[in-house]
Image: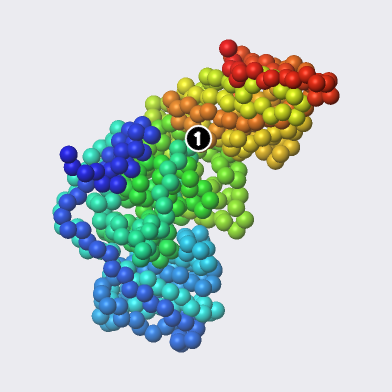
Amino acid sequence: MPRLTRRQVVTGMVAALLGGPVVVAAESGVAPRTRAWTWRGGLSVRSALSADGGLRGATIRVPFPFNALAIIAAQPDSRIRVRTSADTRVWSDWQTIEIGESHGRKGDGSAPAALAMVETGQYLEISADEGVAECQIDVIDSAPSVRSSQSLRSLQAGVSIVSRQGWSADESYRYDERGAELWTPRVYTPHKVVVHHTATSNTESNPAATVRAIHYYHARTLGWGDIGYNYLVDRNGVVYEGRYGGQGVEAGHALGHNGGSIGIACIGTYSSVQISSACRSSLTALIADRARTIDPIDSSWFVDGEMTNVMGHRDAMQYRAGGGTACPGNTLYGLMSTIREEVVSTMGGRPSARLTIDNLAISSNGFIDGGVVGIAVTVRNTGTATVATQDPRAALQYDERESADGRGFGGQSGTWRVALDTRDGAAGFPFRWGLPDALAPGQSATVTGAIQLWTPGRRDVKARVVREGRGEYVDSPTAVSLVVVDRASLGHRVVVPVSPRRSGS
């Protein structure tokens, strides 16, 4: 039996977890290797005033023909202009590159950057605004043609995906010089989709070369170790596999909102240009297939605010101070509502969530005042939609005089939590815990917690699973009873706790 590669093992595990194979295109033959060369310079120091009022640097000869530039500027909100030539006699038009519109930052967050696809050349000339003191340019050649044909396979929704091997991803980018992964893959249950544009050319004749350039820019220039998107879609409707690791893997496409989201980028700039019908069709089909348990129309709290389940990049960043972005461009963003409806139509209807409580158990049913009761509640998703959750996570201990709100864990709209009441529901279920992760259809999760008890007497413990801010909840079928004894009334008597109790036992 042949030995499985690590990639095959990870892909198999993720497919089993998320319910379906990751169907991608494979490609054989010698893969083109992306080349890069780095130039660093102080533009204001070694420049002369150009006709357009900016600063123009000397002509730079690159060791090989190139088709992309990854630029890091020391100053945010810089504008740098470039033009290229094969021989210094005929030059391309000047191309303006905006630095700082959340196109990306180095891994340490220290410097803004941008990627530009340019006319192929071997010479480069740079012009910059006054005050741009220095910059770094990674000059990239991602254009070598692929020698063997692609073999495409279709997903359920009728879209094909080109594998990383198919577009010639350089897997060495994922590792540092010691062989350690730069971004360790982590898998989450997806419950959001974030749509982007790549802010690159709309007329690129070799979209796979653009994907390779983006890969180098994200992995090497910015130091992320891999491409930031989970998937990319070109104007011909071809879909490319992005981040290594398969379905559910955390990518690097929306700062602070990567875990639990699927990042899909439409290749091009869609600030004023509409995406092609082929791109739109594949985007819709891809979302319907890869996010088939996510209700596109619904919304829930995600990290720092309530967001629609299928959103534009700017929606994910709307609550972050200084984190605003125009992505995915005004025209594509203006289509998001229509795209959501088209995804629902492709799915055949909106998936819906339904949670039930399968079991409620407590650690004992007899306590002296000040004792701590442990609780365990098993929840199951019997619906067709993945549900989101929130803090606090399992094992948090409350004092019975406290509440989730009082501890700083107020309800976040649209999320689901387990709620507990030690007075048969009369106290309003003040103790709440989140699920371990978003819960996909058919999955179960056991939530644990603890409450320190002070008030003597008999009480009934009841559990509820609640959708915060929506008035939706499901109660446990039965309650379990416990007794708290006043320590002062014990005298010399000994109270021996009895065995753990479960609802219905």
The answer to whether 372 appears left or right of 255 in the picture is: right
Please, what secondary structure does the residue beneath circle 1 have?
loop
Q: Tell me: residue 32, above or below residue 370.
A: below
The answer to whether 272 appears left or right of 62 in the picture is: right
Residue identified by numbered label 1: 438
| Residue 140 pos. (x, y %) | 32, 68
Would residue 454 be seen by someone viewing this image from the given angle? yes
Q: Tell me: residue 481, above or below residue 307.
A: above
Quadrant in which the N terminus appears: top left
Between 358 and 139, the residue placed more toward the observer is 358
Q: Tell me: residue 297, above or below residue 181.
A: above
| Residue 79 pos. (x, y %) | 49, 71
Q: What residue sits 34% from the left and 33% below the top?
A: 16
Q: Tell me: residue 65, above or below residue 474.
A: below
Quadrant of the rendered structure where residue 15 is?
top left
| Residue 440 pos. (x, y %) | 45, 30
Color theme of the render: rainbow
